[in-house]
Amino acid sequence: MTINNLSAILILGTCLLVKRSAIQFLFCVAISSTPAPLLADLSIGRVYAIEFTDLNGNALSTGDDHISIVIVVTRATWTKAQAIGDRVPDIYVGDSTHRLITIVKFGKHTGPVRALLAAGARRRLNAEARRVQPRYAARKITHDPRHDIFAVADFEGTIAARLGVHNDTFRIFVFGRNGELLAEWNDVPRAEELAAVLK
């Protein structure tokens, strides 16, 4: 598995533990106001180049030469993202080819409320980085896990819609380096299932 530091969790949600250049915490909080076409469920084997901008302004894509674990959650289901991050095999922690991106469906809010939610999300990301630090230390990875945590805040539902997620409160996708959809689950997969797709 190549997950730029994958150890998922919250942002108003969290992140994923992955080495910056390998498994990166991809707790993506994408803030998007661009309308997106409604898509049906994605199909295994098809290629999807879906772009995100995370809470820190990083431009990410499912087709940018990473193996990406993309998790769609709401504030009520963010702990499932954390569970997935914890199930990422240690071998991928700190691996720059893998990353975990968490997209949090916040719903529609005014500008001031969005700012508060974004600030809270950043605090949670900082806390998550501290939580996964022991995994980094165990693998002698010296950089700050916070740099591997990606979180996307979806205030309009446009990001989730690009993934074909409309009313669901949780969904997980694994995309290959070119954006090919390798796997999809409606609940937290077993560690063995996740490892089999990531290798």
Image (spheres, grey):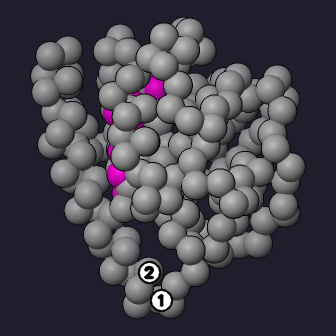
For disc 2, the neighbor class at 10 Å (few under 14, some 14 to 19, many from 20) is some
1 over 49 or under it: above or below? above
Q: Are marks 2 and 1 in contact (CB under 8 Å)?
A: yes
Could you tell me residue 66's position as x and y percent? 57, 28
Q: Which amino acid does label 1 sit on?
A: Gly
Residue range (magenta)? 2-11
Could you tell me residue 116's position as x and y percent? 33, 80
Place residue 76 in its image quadrant.
bottom left
Question: Which residue has dot 2 on it?
Answer: 114
Label 2 vs label 1: CA separation? 5 Å
Q: Any mark on residue 111, and which?
A: 1
Is residue 10 covered in magenta? yes
166 over 14 or under it: above or below? below
Residue 24 seen: no
**Looking at the image, how many numbered discs can be counted on the residues?**
2
Could you tell me residue 13's position as x and y percent? 38, 55
142 over 103 or under it: above or below? above
Could you tell me residue 136's position as x and y percent? 20, 25
Q: Residue at x 75, y 27 (%)?
A: 180
Between 187 and 10, the one nearer to me in the picture:
187
